[in-house]
């Protein structure tokens, strides 16, 4: 049994390019310092004494900036190449995190958050393009999963350490987040600069003329984008309303909340690569996305079914993590399979924008529902949206079968 498990994990991690591993290390360093966003609502409500509605609005402003950043990053990537965009986004984003921590005025915080999100999220389409460049078609989903592993392992470290720091000094979070961004940029420059890594293009390759469909005329892709927004609307409650719910309703400490967030990343780091390696050859990607969408909805509905304790918070985390592992890697596979080297940036930008739109709507609408109608209503709403999203992905699966 032990030998079988060992062989499974060895196979899951084998065959990936060195550049893919370097890129994942860059992401790990960057995400290990991700402490501001998951604790932003707590920072604004606890340290700045703003009501949850205003805190949710700031998170929505962050999402608006992320929409701009995603679309801008996609266009810049197609024009200047993924390396330059990643380097600039990490450096500028790090500086803006430090600057944000010095602000006290609410309108100034909103403006700074918007600029920060625009800079920071222009990194994501470029990063998605880099993974595609550094991987082969047969291991592309695993390459994305390795990147997600780095994100979530870093999230586990950042969540646990961030919870500890937040219970003592919220402002230190901004310095750590900013400096790790800059540190990741330095590592990227050292190991993935075109002069040091042959897989990184020296400039944007315009020699190939083959071109697939445009991202903006791909009807099924637009349906997928809408469904991704619905999924993200539900999922982003994990970072906006859930921390406040844990604090106010379940009476958990910031440190315990950070540990629960770390648990999410730790589970993904331990199991997602093996799960993807096992499931990917079966070529039933949309089925896994449907199952994952339903599990994400269930992770919130469970709060209305089971009496609230710290154990319920842990149970919910296990459910939402299972849904995330089933859905998100195969969402990446869906959009990347519809692209070529000429249009990949725009596809990635639109996909990034979908998540950013969800980041606008999720925190804002979720916080308003929680403030005006209560958390019980919010969790039932999330459950219903998840069912609608799963039904939409099922329709998309049927349409793909007809056209395939």
Image (cartoon, grey):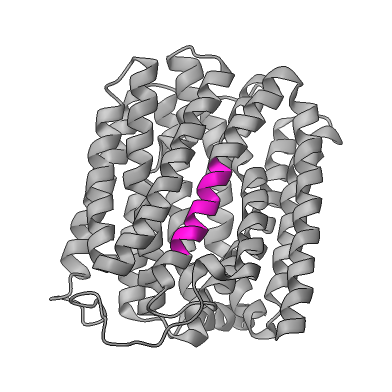
**Where on the picture, by quarter, is residue 362?**
top right
Residue at the spot x=74%, y=64% of the render? Answer: 393
Residue 157 visible at all: no
Q: Where is residue 352 in the image (x, y as percent from the top left)?
A: 48, 56
Residue toward you, 391 or 293: 391
Residue 78 picture location, percent across and down: 33, 68
Left or right: residue 239 versus residue 99 is: right
Quadrant in which the N terminus is drawn: bottom right
| Magenta span of residues | 348-359
Q: Is residue 282 visible?
A: yes
- Residue at the (76%, 50%) spot, across then down: 386
Residue 114, percent across and down? 38, 35
**Residue ID at (40%, 61%):** 125
248 is higher (above) or lower (below) than 332: above
Q: In which quarter of the image is residue 367?
A: top right
Q: How many marks?
A: 0
Residue at the limit of the structure toward the front, as seen here: 217
Majority SS type along the magenta span:
helix
355 over 146 or under it: above or below:
above
Along the viewing direction, whichever of 228 and 51 lies nearer the viewer: 228
Queried whether the magenta region covers residue 388, the answer comes back as: no
- Quarter holding the C terminus is bottom right
């Amino acid at each position: 049994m032990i030998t079988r498990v060992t062989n499974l994990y060895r196979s899951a991690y084998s065959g990936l390019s060195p550049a893919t591993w370097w890129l994942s290390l860059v992401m790990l360093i960057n995400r290990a310092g991700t402490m501001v966003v998951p604790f932003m609502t707590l920072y604004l409500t606890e340290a700045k004494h703003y009501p949850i509605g205003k805190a949710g609005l700031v998170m929505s402003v962050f999402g608006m900036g992320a929409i701009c950043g995603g679309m801008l990053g996609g266009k810049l990537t197609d024009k200047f190449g993924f390396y330059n965009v990643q380097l600039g986004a990490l450096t500028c984003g790090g500086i803006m995190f430090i600057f944000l921590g010095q602000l006290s005025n609410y309108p100034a915080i909103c403006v700074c958050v918007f600029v920060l999100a625009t800079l920071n999220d222009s990194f994501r389409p470029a990063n998605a393009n880099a993974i595609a460049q550094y991987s082969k078609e047969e291991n592309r989903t695993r390459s994305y999963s390795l990147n997600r592993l780095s994100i979530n392992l870093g999230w586990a470290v950042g969540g646990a350490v961030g919870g500890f720091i937040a219970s003592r000094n919220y402002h230190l979070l901004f310095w750590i987040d900013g400096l790790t961004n800059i540190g990741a940029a330095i590592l990227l420059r050292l190991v993935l600069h075109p002069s040091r890594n042959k897989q990184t293009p020296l400039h944007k390759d315009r020699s190939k003329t083959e071109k697939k469909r445009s991202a903006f005329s791909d009807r099924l892709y637009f349906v997928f984008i809408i469904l991704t927004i619905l999924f993200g609307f539900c999922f982003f409650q994990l970072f906006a309303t859930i921390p406040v719910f844990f604090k106010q309703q379940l009476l958990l400490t910031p440190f315990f909340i950070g540990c629960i967030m770390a648990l999410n990343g730790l589970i993904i780091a331990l199991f997602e690569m093996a799960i993807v390696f096992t499931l990917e050859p079966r070529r039933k990607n949309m089925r896994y996305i449907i199952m994952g969408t339903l599990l994400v909805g269930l992770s919130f509905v469970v709060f209305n079914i089971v009496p609230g304790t710290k154990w319920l918070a842990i149970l919910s985390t296990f459910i939402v993590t299972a849904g995330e592992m089933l859905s998100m890697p195969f969402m990446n596979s869906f959009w990347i399979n519809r692209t070529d080297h000429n249009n990949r940036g725009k596809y990635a930008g639109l996909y990034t924008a979908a998540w950013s739109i969800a980041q606008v709507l999720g925190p804002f609408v979720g916080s308003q529902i929680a403030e005006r109608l209560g958390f019980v209503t919010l969790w039932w709403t999330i459950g219903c949206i998840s069912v609608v999203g799963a039904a939409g992905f099922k329709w998309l699966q049927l349409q793909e079968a007809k056209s395939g």
